[in-house]
Image: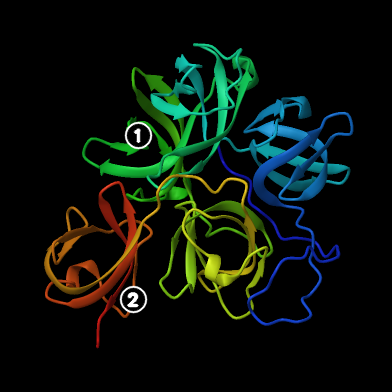
Amino acid sequence: MKKLVLVSIIGLVLSGCGGGSSNGNTNPQPETKPQDVQGTIESVDAASKQITVNGYHYDVASVMYGSNALSITDLEKNMMVQVFSGAKSGVQVQVEPTIVGMVTDINHTANTFTVNGIELVFAGLHADIEINDLVMVSSLPTATAGYKVLSVVEFEADQLGNTVEVEGRLSNLDINRNTFNLGASLTVNYTSGVIEDGATLANGQWVEVIGDMAGFDLNATEIEVEDFDGLSDGNEVEGVITWVAADTSAFELSYRGRFYVDSNTRFEDGTKSQLTQGRVVEVKSVKQGTQQVAIDVEFDDDYNDQGQWNEFELEGMVSAVDTAANTFVLGSKTIMIDANTVFEGGVTLDTLTQQRIEVDGVIMDKDYVAREIEVDND
């Protein structure tokens, strides 16, 4: 399912929303209301045909899931959506779930259920949801690249075109077998899958997969790599911080890509020092060259509970490199690189052997995954 491209905000000037700024501005500029935003629904007023997303109110002209038309009455609080300002009389709402599929196991006492072979936990699960019901799950990523469920909504199969969908962090890519994993347990076979925009798959990417379940495996028909490269100036994106640079000059959002911070970045309801893993934020940015630079970061404390987050910083001499496995050994640690690893100062994986380097990254389960690598010249 091809995502709609976020477009730039209009110049409708509103009064400032309050919150702190760490860049020293004593007279912050008035905010502009984004007409195009990706985030969670805070409220739905079906009678007035209005929804609130990221604190903004929108008149709804239409609701879509891919090419399937839905109704505003299908929307619920905490569903993940993209608001697209394509209609004069109101906005188009594109529903952007993390998982869509049939419930194959459920335990209302333990608040657990399984969809597409992925076991999930959600205390707010509706009592009338049963095995074989089709559900749409919205979630945020966790510290282990799993799923912090925000909402579970039941649909009739024909409403969604009998779609099976899963988003997640790609791991264990096997280009010989045309397989990879999403989450901790789902195997995806992409032998017959179309990879949109000619992208090359790599471990660490956040991908959206549409296809059909074959037992416990997902046979992909469409795969889309989700990142922030195509975001237009002034967009607003909600997500969870999954890594922060040691000097807080950049942060990664929802495993999809990074935003850079400069002296003009404004912070609302928090400060730059509060950029930490697990914090949920809403980010507006502009593109400068190949980088997305944050112009506004607003902290949201509603969902800051996605597990135990861990980062690491190491320095020393690289003793071994395995280019086939995309790993290297530093001291007693084997460090993985993935699609979001950035090499600085001209160094590459091929040239790391016997180099003294500094590396920082994230720990997912027991895996050390590099985010920035540079030569240590001290």
Colour mapping: rainbow
Q: Position of residue 363 (x, y in %)?
A: 32, 54
Name which residue type carries label 2: Glu
Q: Nearer the viewer, residue 253 or 313?
A: 313
- Mark 1 or 2: in front is 2
Name which residue type carries label 1: Tyr
Q: Is residue 137 above or below residue 367?
A: above
Q: Is residue 44 above or below residue 253?
A: above
Going 40% across and 34% down the picture, which residue do you hit?
193
Going 54% across and 65% down the picture, which residue do you hit?
274
**Disc assigned to residue 190:** 1
Between the residue at mark 1 and the residue at mark 2, the CA separation in whole angstroms equals 33 Å
Disc 1 or 2, which lies upstream in sequence?
Answer: 1
Is residue 41 in sight in this rendering? yes
**Disc assigned to residue 182:** none
| Quadrant into which the N terminus falls | top right
Is residue 223 in sight in this rendering? no
Q: Secondary structure at mark 1?
A: loop
Q: Residue furthest bottom?
A: 378
| Quadrant into which the C terminus falls | bottom left
Q: Position of residue 231 (x, y in %)?
A: 60, 59
Going 46% across and 21% down the picture, which residue do you hit?
110
Q: Is residue 343 above or below residue 79?
A: below
Give the labeled residue for mark 2.
344
Q: Position of residue 40 (x, y in %)?
A: 65, 42
Going 30% across and 46% down the picture, which residue do you hit?
365
Position of residue 65 in the picture relative to residue 341 (left or right): right
Count of numbered circles on the image: 2
Quick one: label 1, few (<14), some, or many (20+) residues within 10 Å?
A: many
Q: Nearer the viewer, residue 194 or 172?
A: 172
Q: Position of residue 245 (x, y in %)?
A: 42, 69
Position of residue 38 in the picture relative to residue 32 (left or right): left
